[in-house]
């Protein structure tokens, strides 16, 4: 389970005072691929989840998008130099999520090969251990400050320099150490065997030399002394017995030579030996012998034969016998010493032989032990690897690697565990997609079955609608004929009605004129009434004036004149009334005639309306039948509309499910893109971006969020780099 925690550190500027750390889960395997310029072409779902970016925003972006600012550039420079040389880089990298949280990973980056051709780079990241993280933080902090003495990066691994680093890197449990131990043991055995042989040969030569010097040469010297003493006796004895016949000069020369030879032989014998009692005795005897021989020779030279004979018999010969006995004793002693030397040599030879046998047996035991250890490690590790690979081949990804080792075989088993975890993650992701696809496909199946059932219902409704439409067709044809006749009658009625309207309009106009005449008559009558009123007034005045007599008659005359005028006006009004009455009579007569004509037209209209009513009755009956058919059609159409709406809803649901299936299929395709087949196209960020955008249903490259971590190279620069075929080697590492 992934967790986020706060870490507190104030030791170096390498770590912030308070920084959120995102911990990867033990089973998390982050996999990505990139092109030759370090731009991402594939990322698994775990990588996407941990980074915090959507997949479509990751495609085509360089890996430095996730780079933590505290990471030293020397690490990425070493990374790029390693993979550019075709090697695999393994080390710790600190990245940063979109939310700003930091996380450590044990990262393995290697060239992506298609045959012998490098087509991109692949990266696998696992959770790093606490110990390795603490060490990396210390070393990377020192690298940030420019302090690189005492350690170096070797293909991503942090190593100490010099003998200290070699000793720390050397592990007696590693296969390399065991193989080196076997080779060293073989070399040591060969050296020991050779040294033993050389020592044996040297000691044998030394013993032979010693035997030669102390044995053979010593015996030879003793024998030569004994021989020279015997020769001296042989030379002296004739001279002693017959001095006159002796050649004194020759005798002296011979004795001198023999004396010198005896002295040299004795010096040669005693030079290589410590002084012993026999040697001291022989020394005295030789001195006595030489001295007595000189006395004898002097006596012979002096002519004192008796003294010479006495010295020869009493001293020289007994001394010669003693010398012979002593020489024999010394020879026997030398023989005993030689025998002792031989016995010692045989003993040393046996010791050397036993030592060689012991070394050989020790070497054999050591070789067998190392071989057994190596075989045990190999067999146990290979059995574990075989078990895991068999389980993986059998589809069981739940069986973890249980054997923990710290050697090369452990790295192999760790790689197998990484492969198992990676495949498990991929299968889990595929399983999740299948869990989405399976209900969707079942839902589509169910919706299709319901759609088929509703389609059958709709077909039945269409058959009923077709039958009703056949009945309606005949009814509509009859209604059409009736409507045509009704139309003709209606046209005739329209004409008659129009004529009736015109007549009625004329009647109305006449009646209006009569009304106007009547109004005028009313006015005239009002005038007559006024005249009558005034006449009455005048008559009253005339009566008053008549009552007055006298000269007041003039006023009466005026009144009378006015009465006449009023009378004239009354006559005129009466005439006008007569004319108006005559005119009204004529108008009324004409109106009566017009009314008669209108009555006749109305009778005709009524007759035609009755006919139209009959036809409309027939049309109404047909319309009732049509209404019934239309009601059936409406019902069928309503059912068809309802079914159609349901079908449309189902089709929309099926379309959405199909869209989801398409998206999941594209997502599955992205999961399958984790595997690269032989002969596939080179890694391309543009192709990967198009694939992901198609999966997301987008048509253009989205912009990264403004809150995204600032990489070393701006997004605009990266956009320009996408159109650049390659980057210089000294700058390529900055974008990785």
Image: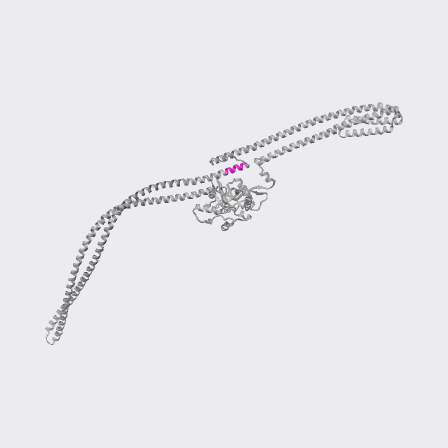
Q: Which residues are magenta?
A: 409-418
**Most prominent secondary structure in the magenta stretch?**
helix
573 sits to left or right of 705? left
Image height of 473 relative to 302, above or below: below
Q: Is residue 238 magenta?
A: no
Q: Is residue 533 visible?
A: no
Q: How is the image coloured?
A: one colour
45 or 529: nearer the eye?
45
Which of the 4 quarters of the picture holds residue 437? top left
Residue 595: give x, y in percent of width and height: 17, 59
Image height of 395 relative to 497, above or below: above
Residue 49: give x, y in percent of width and height: 46, 43
Q: Residue at x 48, y 38 (%)?
A: 421
Q: Is residue 250 visible?
A: yes
Residue 517: give x, y in percent of width and height: 17, 64
383 sits to left or right of 443? right
Residue 64: give x, y in percent of width and height: 51, 47
Which of the 4 quarters of the picture holds residue 582? bottom left
Q: Residue at x 50, y 37 (%)?
A: 417
- Total numbered circles: 0
Which of the 4 quarters of the picture holds residue 602? bottom left
Hey, which residue is sitting farthest bottom in the picture?
551
Q: Residue at x 58, y 37 (%)?
A: 170
99 or 690: nearer the eye?
690
């Amino acid at each position: 389970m992934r967790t986020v925690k706060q870490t507190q550190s104030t030791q170096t500027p390498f770590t912030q005072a308070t920084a959120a750390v995102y911990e990867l889960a033990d089973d998390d395997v982050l996999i990505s691929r990139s092109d030759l310029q370090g731009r991402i072409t594939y990322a698994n779902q775990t990588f996407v989840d941990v980074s915090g970016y959507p997949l479509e925003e990751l495609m085509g972006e360089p890996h430095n998008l996730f780079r933590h600012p505290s990471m030293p550039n020397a690490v990425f420079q070493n990374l790029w130099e390693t993979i550019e040389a075709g090697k695999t880089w393994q080390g710790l990298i600190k990245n940063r999520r979109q939310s700003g949280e930091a996380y450590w990973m044990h990262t393995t980056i290697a060239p992506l090969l298609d045959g012998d051709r490098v087509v991109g780079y692949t990266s696998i990241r696992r959770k790093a251990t606490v110990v390795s993280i603490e060490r990396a933080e210390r070393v990377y902090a020192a690298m940030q400050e420019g302090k690189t003495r005492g350690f170096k990066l070797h293909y991503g691994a942090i190593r100490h320099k010099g003998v200290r680093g070699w000793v720390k890197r050397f592990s007696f449990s590693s296969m390399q150490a065991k193989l080196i131990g076997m080779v060293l043991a073989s070399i040591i055995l060969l050296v020991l065997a050779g040294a033993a042989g050389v020592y044996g040969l040297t000691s044998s030569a030394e013993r032979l030399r010693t035997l030669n010097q102390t044995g053979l040469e010593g015996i030879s010297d003793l024998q030569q002394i004994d021989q020279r003493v015997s020769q001296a006796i042989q030379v002296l004895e004739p001279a002693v017995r017959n001095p006159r016949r002796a050649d004194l000069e020759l005798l002296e020369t011979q004795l001198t030579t023999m004396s010198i030879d005896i002295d040299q032989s004795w010096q040669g014998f005693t030079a290589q030996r410590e002084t012993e009692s026999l040697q001291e005795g022989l020394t005295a005897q030789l001195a006595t012998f030489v001295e007595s021989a000189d006395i004898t020779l002097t006596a012979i030279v002096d002519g004192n034969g008796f003294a010479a004979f006495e010295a020869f018999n009493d001293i020289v010969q007994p001394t010669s016998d003693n010398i012979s006995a002593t020489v024999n004793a010394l020879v026997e002693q030398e023989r005993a010493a030689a025998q002792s030397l031989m016995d010692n040599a045989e003993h040393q030879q046996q010791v050397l032989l036993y030592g060689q046998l012991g070394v050989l047996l020790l070497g054999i035991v050591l070789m067998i032990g190392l071989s057994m250890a190596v075989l045990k490690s190999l067999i146990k590790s290979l059995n574990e690897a075989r078990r895991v690979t068999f389980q993986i081949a059998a589809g069981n990804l739940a069986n973890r690697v249980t054997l923990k080792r710290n050697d090369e075989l452990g790295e192999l088993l760790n790689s197998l565990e990484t492969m198992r975890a990676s495949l498990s993650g991929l299968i889990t992701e595929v399983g999740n997609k299948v869990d989405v696809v399976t209900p969707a496909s079942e839902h589509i199946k169910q919706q299709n079955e319901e759609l088929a059932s509703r389609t059958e219902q709709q077909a039945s409704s269409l058959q009923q609608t077709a039958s009703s439409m056949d009945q309606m067709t005949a009814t509509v044809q009859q209604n059409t004929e009736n409507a045509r006749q009704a139309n003709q009658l209606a046209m005739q009625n329209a004409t008659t009605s129009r004529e009736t309207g015109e007549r009625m309009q004329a009647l109305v106009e006449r009646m209006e004129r009569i009304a106007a005449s009547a109004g005028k008559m009313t006015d005239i009558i009002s005038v007559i009434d006024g005249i009558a009123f005034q006449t009455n007034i005048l008559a009253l005045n005339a009566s008053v004036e008549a009552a007055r007599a006298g000269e007041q008659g003039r006023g009466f005359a005026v009144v009378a004149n006015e009465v006449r005028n009023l009378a004239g006006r009354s006559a005129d009004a009466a005439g006008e009334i007569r004319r108006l009455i005559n005119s009204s009579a004529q108008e009324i007569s004409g109106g009566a005639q017009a009314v008669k004509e209108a009555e006749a037209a109305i009778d005709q209209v009524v007759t035609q309306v009755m006919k139209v009513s009959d036809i409309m009755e027939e049309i109404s009956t047909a319309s009732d039948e049509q209404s019934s058919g239309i009601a059936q059609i409406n019902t069928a159409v309503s059912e068809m509309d309802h079914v159609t709406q349901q079908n449309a809803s189902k089709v929309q649901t099926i379309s959405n499910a199909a869209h989801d299936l398409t998206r999941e299929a594209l997502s599955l395709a992205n999961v399958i893109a984790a595997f690269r087949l032989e002969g596939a196209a080179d890694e391309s960020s543009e192709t990967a971006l198009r694939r992901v955008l198609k999966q997301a249903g987008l048509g253009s490259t989205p912009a990264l969020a403004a809150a995204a971590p600032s990489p070393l190279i701006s997004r605009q620069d990266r956009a320009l780099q996408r159109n650049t075929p390659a980057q210089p080697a000294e700058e390529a590492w900055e974008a990785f």
